[in-house]
Image: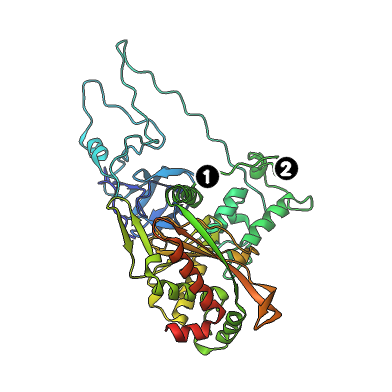
Amino acid sequence: MAIHKSAPAVDGVHSFKLPDVGEGLVEAELLTWYVKPGDTVTDGQMICEIETAKAVVELPVPFSGTVKELLAAEGDTVEVGSVIITVDDGTGGSGTAPYSGSGAEAPAPAAGMTAGPAEDTEEREKPLVGYGEKASATQRRARRRPGPSGPVSPPAPKPAEPTPAVVAVPAGPAPASGRPLAKPPVRKLAKDLGVDLATVAPTGKGGVVTREDVHAAVEAAASPQGTAPSATAAEAAPAPDRTARERRVPIKGVRKHTAAAMVNSAFTAPHVTEFLQVDVTKTMKAVARLRERRDFADVKVSPLLLVAKALLMAVRRHPEVNASWDEQNQEIVVKNYVNLGIAAATERGLVVPNIKDADAQTLPELAASLKALTEKARAGKTSPADMSGGTITITNVGVFGVDAGTPIINPGEAAILAFGQIRDMPWVHKGELKIRKVTTLSLSFDHRLVDGELGSKVLRDIGTALEDPELTALAWG
């Protein structure tokens, strides 16, 4: 990810603006600062962690020097193009950083004078690729101008921000760097619960703080036998009342993006959903045999792998289901490649990363791709690039013990397949009633692109492939 210097240095002080790290993102939540004023940073050093509408990413600083000021606090939602940190490179003495628009009132020029070159440069600076200046920047306050009766009165002091609650827990060993080791979802959990990660005893491999560690810290602090709170924690604001009848959760980040995308899809694409119950006894036997093969030793072989392969075979037989609707040009765009999306529930909400060119992968390669995709999503490291360009999606609702559903199509795609739980059920097999492994498949499709006949053929082919995966693979290649 290329990060560019946002503005020229003024008196040796560089201003770093929040970049657009995705595809047309407009804002991000600042999760964690890795530095503080007075720290020395080097070009390329990671300085903070942010959560956009699509992913959690770390930002590197594009210059070296001493941190002068942090212009956004942890938990703030910051617009792309806003200055978040200033760094003094030591070459210009004690100059002042350009106005950031994120807190203090900018000094107005003296009466009868115009703004200087530095201010003009800052005002005309285009934030980053993909964005022009936003007319209604929420973090910039209009300057007060002198009225006819005389000079302007100074602005009223800004009320102090409330101090967030901090849970006091038994102190644990901190890493040598001084920053606790934890994955982004765990950091967000700790922030939501008011837990200072620096005080949590890690139990994860390599001294990593886990979700269980955070919950244990909360329980220890709440227990009468727990460690007595420190003076700092005792003076902090009270922790959230967990006995309240309601709890409000801010809608932002991935959850906000997903909600908007799903509403847009549901009210733009006319959805149709079809269902099919399938005997997958042979699929389950094939999964067991694949797990014993040497070329699958380092990957996880699950029924989802064969469901993905069955969908890919059906797409090859019916490529029109792998398409998108171009409203502007009034065209249907049929894709000759398959970027297979896999819906994943994470701590940050639903994400749908996709396997690029999944149709060109062998079964072992597809298994490895599924493993990498899942691990990345669980770690909160799914990038915007991982989630862009999908052509058709699978959502595995069976892992939640659900038989079927009517999934909403991922925006820009024509269909989504829901894979239900596999259960032992009475089934007529070769003319006799037997107990077989059965699942339900649900295919939602955009009726502008896919008519009932095509949707039914696709769903039937997926079912056929799962009823006898080995014979189907030989017959269809």
Amino acid bearing label 1:
Ile
Q: Quadrant of the C terminus?
A: bottom left
Query: Distance of mark 2 from mark 1, alpha carbons?
Result: 22 Å
What is the x, y in percent for residue 370? 49, 72
The scheme the figure's colours follow is rainbow
Residue drawn at the location 79% of the way across and 50% of the way down: 224
Residue 170 at least partly seen = no
First in residue order: circle 2 vs circle 1: 2
Q: Secondary structure at mark 2?
A: loop
Secondary structure under tag 1 reads loop
Q: Amino acid at mark 2?
A: Thr
Question: Is 246 located above or below residue 175 in the figure?
Answer: above
Q: In the visual, does 219 lie left or right of 443?
A: right
Rendering coords of residue 355 (x, y %)? 42, 69
Is residue 457 among the parts visible in the rendering? Answer: yes
Image quadrant occupied by the N terminus? bottom left
Q: Is residue 117 left or right of residue 98?
A: left
Mark number for residue 50? none
Label 1 environment density (alpha carbons within 10 Å; few <14, some 14–19, many ≥20): few
Q: 403 or 250: which is nearer to us?
A: 403
For this view, does 191 lie left or right of residue 413? right
Read off the residue under disc 1.
251
Residue underneath mark 2: 243
Instruction: Depth check: give the residue in front, 394 or 126.
Output: 394
Quadrant position of residue 187: bottom right
> For the image shown, how many numbered marks are present on the structure?
2
